[in-house]
Image (cartoon, helix red, strand yellow):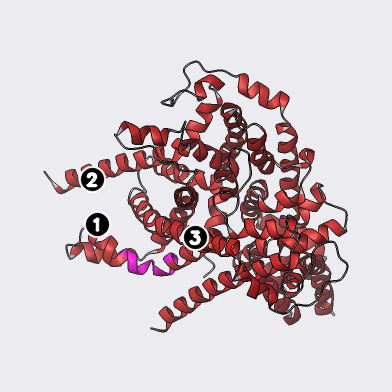
Amino acid sequence: MLRRKQFWFAIMAILPTFAIFGWVRLFPIIETLRLSMHEWNLLSKNKPFVGFQNFIELFGDNQFMDALTNTAVIAFGAMAVTIPMSMVLAAIIYHRTRSRFSGFYETAVFIPHVVSLVPAAMAWKWIFDAKLGPLNAIIMGLGGDALPWLFDPVLSVICIIFLVSWQTLGYGVLIYLVGFRNLPKSVFEAAQLDGANGFQSFLYMSVPLLKPITLYVSVVTLISGFNVYAQAYVLASDTQGAPGRQVRVLVLDMLENSFQNFRVGYAAAEAVILLSIVLLLTMIQFGLLRGKGGR
Amino acid sequence: MSATDRARRTNFLLDVTLFVICILLLTPLILLIANGFKTPQEMLVWPPTLFPKDPTLENFHKVFTETPLLRWMLNSFLFAILSTVAIVATSALAGYIIGKFPFRTINIIFILFLATAIIPFEVYMIPLYFQVKALGLLNSVGGLLVGYLVMSFGIFLIRQNVIASIPDELLEAARIDGAGELWIFWYVVLPLLRGPLAALAVLAFFQAWTAFAWPIIVMTRKKSFTIEVGLANFQSAYTVDLSLLSAASAAVMVPSVLAFVLLRRNFVEGIAASGMKE
């Protein structure tokens, strides 16, 4: 009797959440998969089934391939910068936990992560500005040549990597700090007794022990890198405000195909590719973690 | 030199290094604020000045009187508050049920929903846009909210805390005393979850406040922009006036940084928990 009452309470309490989930998550996800196999130009009533036609077309589409390459370079580039830097930074901050300034360090490193994307990108846009920005002023002050940072396709990608890394660094440091705090202290004391210095115990003990965290932060950084949009929208828009002229990224290409070229099915196919990349990365993460546990 | 002296010197050097790194990381934001106080003429000077020669409040005055910045901030604020309420409410209730009511059907559905958390929002936002459009909710905070009503991680976080910090005996005792399930949830469970709920609320608020891709497709009228979308489009309209743009960005940024510094503990708790899933 009591259990029956509890069961009904549980059902009634969770039903709204389940309904919302079905409505705003499950349904659109299934729609994405379905639409990717259909041709739909937004205006016509019928959406003919085209099978894998959209996907085949995508791989011959230069703009899409361009977007895919740029996005992958940004995602992996940002990861390559973020991981080592956040690990070292976290190690130093952890070492100085008892310092009077440790609160300041954590806050300062984390602020770029919580600042909204657009104002942050504005700040960098001025720094990178070819004609007015301090970066070129410094380069010229040192005797170098001014570079067209945001007007060159390769340099703009570097700028975006820089911006994305600056933003994710704080997140990486935070997660690594938790990791450092959970490391077994006794092992480090033993190493110290054996004469290992701080650098050695970082390299030979912390780095391997923190491998699961490194894996986690890498995958999170990569996935958020593959979804990069606002940064490219602001940084790489030209003076007329046309976004993405210089750096085409996946989300931008997807939105353009859907809302400017009115090819929703085609855009959905792009979304499915983005989804496959994310799932692949997640699977690699789980696979590596399990492999480690089995040893 | 003794060992403690050497340790002290290393520590001092590390502190200096950390200080320099922290200042470098904050430099772009400091420069942005400084630019907000420059005159448009000073923005065009080469080499660029780092700090304004004769600071002016003119830009801030203009931003608040001549642009819809306040309106955009209000839109964002309303959206973020409503999203926070929805996420905290659904997560508290669902997390509690899943943590303490071990019915198999519920758990299976829960795992299914948790699995969707892996899928980035960007993947399914286009079909979701058409759902919102069909409801006639484009350009409204309601439409914006559709994408931010639930958070899988929130349900997960509350579930973990329910299991860890609410003993079954407590619930059983309340039931024997004749308390109703809803009463127990409201007066016994919720007060015990204050900490994690606060962390979740801060996380949810910032997530909505900084949203970009979803608002940019749902809110297409100037009046309905969120602050992020407004600012991003602002630069095409006022692109020549960099100082005005900086003032607008600074006006948006400073309150959120202050809020973060005040709520740092809650925030860090939430983010750190997200990394401890494994």
Q: Can residue A118 be seen in this view?
A: yes
Q: What element carries label 2?
A: helix
Identify residue for label 3.
Answer: A75
Give the quadrant of residue B171: bottom right
Q: Is residue A105 left or right of residue B76?
A: left
Cβ atoms at labels 3 and 2 below 8 Å apart: no
Q: Where is residue A22 in the image (x, y as percent from the top left)?
A: 78, 69
What's the magenta bit mostly, secondary-structure-wise? helix
Image height check: is B47 above or below B101? above
- Is disc 2 surrounded by few (<14), some (14 to 19) or many (20+) residues within 10 Å? few
- Residue drawn at point x = 71 percent, y = 37 percent: B73
What is the span of residues highlighted in magenta in the rendered image? A206-214
- Residue drawn at point x = 67 percent, y = 53 percent: B213
Q: Position of residue B5 (x, y in %)?
A: 17, 43
Q: Where is residue B211 in the image (x, y as percent from the top left)?
A: 66, 50
Image height check: is B237 above or below A216? above
Identify residue for label 2.
Answer: B10
Disc 3 marks a residue whose amino acid type is Ala
Q: Is mark 1 on a helix, strand or loop?
A: helix
Q: In this view, does A140 lie to the left or right of A162?
A: left
Give the quadrant of residue B130: bottom right
Q: Where is residue A8 in the image (x, y as percent from the top left)?
A: 84, 74
Cβ atoms at labels 2 and 1 below 8 Å apart: yes
Chain of residue at mark 3: A
Disc 2 marks a residue whose amino acid type is Thr
Structural distance between the alpha carbons of marks 1 and 3: 32 Å
- Residue drawn at point x = 70 percent, y = 33 percent: B69
Disc 1 marks a residue whose amino acid type is Gly
- Label for residue A198? 1
Quarter the C terminus of chain A occupies: bottom left
